[in-house]
Image (tube, grey):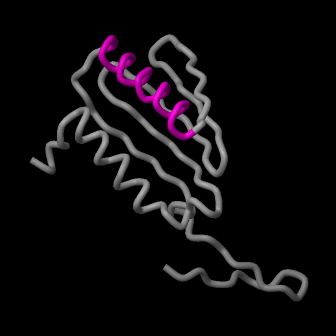
């Protein structure tokens, strides 16, 4: 979708971003599961350990009343994963260089979720 210039302001044109379009480099993935609290927390812990070892992506987990929040920040990426008893919600902000690989990164995340949780009902 192309952006169109807004009305000139002080002789300059400003480009308006469509309000509903996702920003470049942003990923939001939500995935239901049937692991329960213990299984979901174990899987999240395993992911955090692997992320720290494999990609040098330090993770910090905070337990809240109704869910856990895992935040992470590393070279070219930052985000959070929320762990609920019935779903995972992942939000990533990719840096400029990694945003060129956004579709590949999203596909790999979905592939890993399929391996750990099974395919989504729509994929069956």
Residue projecting furthest to the left: 124
Q: Is residue 57 left or right of residue 112?
A: right
Magenta segment, principal secondary structure? Answer: helix
- 53 is within the stretch colored magenta: yes
Corner quadrant of residue 17: bottom right
Q: How many marks?
A: 0
User: How far across and down, in percent of the image, does residue 124 sit?
Assistant: 9, 47
Residue found at the very far front of the displayed protein: 53
77 or 86, which is in the foreground? 77
Residue 29 in the image: above or below residue 57:
below
What residue do we see at 56% from left, 70% from top? Answer: 18
Residue 104 appears at what percent x and percent y?
40, 60
Relative depth, front residue between 85 and 21:
85
Nearest to the observer: residue 122 or residue 39: 39
Q: Is residue 67 above or below residue 13?
A: above
Q: Which residues are magenta?
A: 37-55
**Left or right: residue 97 compared with residue 86:** right
Q: Position of residue 110 (x, y in %)?
A: 32, 47
User: In the orientation shown, which residue stands out farthest toward the right?
Assistant: 10
In the rendered image, residue 41 lying in the magenta stretch gets the answer yes
In depth, the one of 92 and 22 nearer the eye is 92
Q: Residue at point 62% right, 63% down?
A: 97
Q: Residue at x 31, y 42 (%)?
A: 112
105 in relation to 38, above or below:
below
**Residue 85 image position (x, y, % from top left):** 33, 19
User: In screen coordinates, is 96 left or right of 47?
Assistant: right
- Residue, x 59% and y 30% (percent of image)? 71
């Amino acid at each position: 979708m192309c952006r169109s210039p807004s009305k000139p302001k002080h002789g300059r044109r400003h480009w308006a971003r469509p309000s509903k379009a996702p920003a470049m480099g942003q990923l939001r993935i939500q995935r239901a599961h049937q692991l329960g609290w213990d299984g979901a927390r174990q899987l999240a812990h395993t992911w955090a350990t692997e992320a720290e070892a494999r990609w040098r992506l330090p993770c910090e987990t905070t337990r809240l009343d109704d869910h856990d929040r895992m935040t992470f920040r590393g070279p070219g990426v930052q985000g959070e994963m929320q762990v609920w008893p019935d779903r995972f919600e992942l939000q990533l902000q990719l840096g400029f260089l990694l945003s060129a690989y956004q579709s590949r990164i999203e596909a790999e995340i979905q592939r890993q979720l399929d391996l750990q949780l099974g395919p989504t009902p729509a994929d069956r």
